[in-house]
Amino acid sequence: MKNLLLVAIITVLGFCQVTAQNANPASAAAATTVVNPNVPKAKWDKTVSDFGEIVQGIPKEAEFKLTNEGKEPLLIQMAKAGCGCTNLKYSQEPVLPGKSTIVAATYNAAAMGPFTKSITVTTNADPNPVMLLIKGSVIPKK
């Protein structure tokens, strides 16, 4: 009886040890992944532009400066305003290493009151998009 119990315990412990060694194969693969040191690197001068108070019906523009601090060209793959009240202008040309470009967002100021609007920008520097914000308060014409 003792021998049978001993064999069962050894079998369970052996199974647990084998399972524990293969528990997370993704982390083992990530540890051996080589990162390219030459990739583009996006650096924004700011991610929020506060207009303060703006007069209703007079559009206001914010500029966000994007600099490529990497060693390969940076591409703006997608830039999208959160609503139709914000228009975007940005270059489709690659941003060379050490150079900059502007993403301009114009808010139409049609609706009265406080606002916060988002602009989502995706580049080849990072698979995660960057969220830019414009905010302020629209006041009536005097």
Image: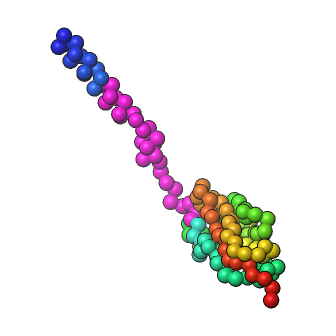
Toward which corner of the image does residue 82 lie, by quadrant? bottom right
102 falls in the magenta region: no
Question: Where does residue 36 sit, x and y in percent of width and height?
Answer: 52, 56
Q: Quadrant of the N terminus?
A: top left
Task: Name the residue nearer the viewer: 4 or 37.
Answer: 4
Q: Is residue 19 left or right of residue 98?
A: left
Q: Nearer the viewer, residue 124 or 5?
A: 5
Does the magenta portion include 24?
A: yes
Q: Is residue 124 visible?
A: yes
- In this view, 17 is above or below 32: above
Q: Is residue 141 left or right of residue 20?
A: right
Q: Position of residue 116 (x, y in %)?
A: 67, 70
Q: Nearer the viewer, residue 141 or 22?
A: 141
**Image location (x, y in percent) of residue 42:** 59, 66
Q: Residue at x 59, y 60 (%)?
A: 125
Q: Residue furthest left?
A: 2
| Total residue callouts | 0
Residue at the far top in the pictured view? 1
Q: Which residues are magenta?
A: 14-41
| Residue in the picture at 47% in, 51% down | 34
The reply to whether residue 96 is in sight is no
What's the colour scheme?
rainbow
Place residue 7 in its image quadrant: top left
Q: Residue at x 63, y 64 (%)?
A: 131
- What residue is rendered at 79% in x and 80% in y? 56
Q: Is residue 108 above or below residue 7?
A: below
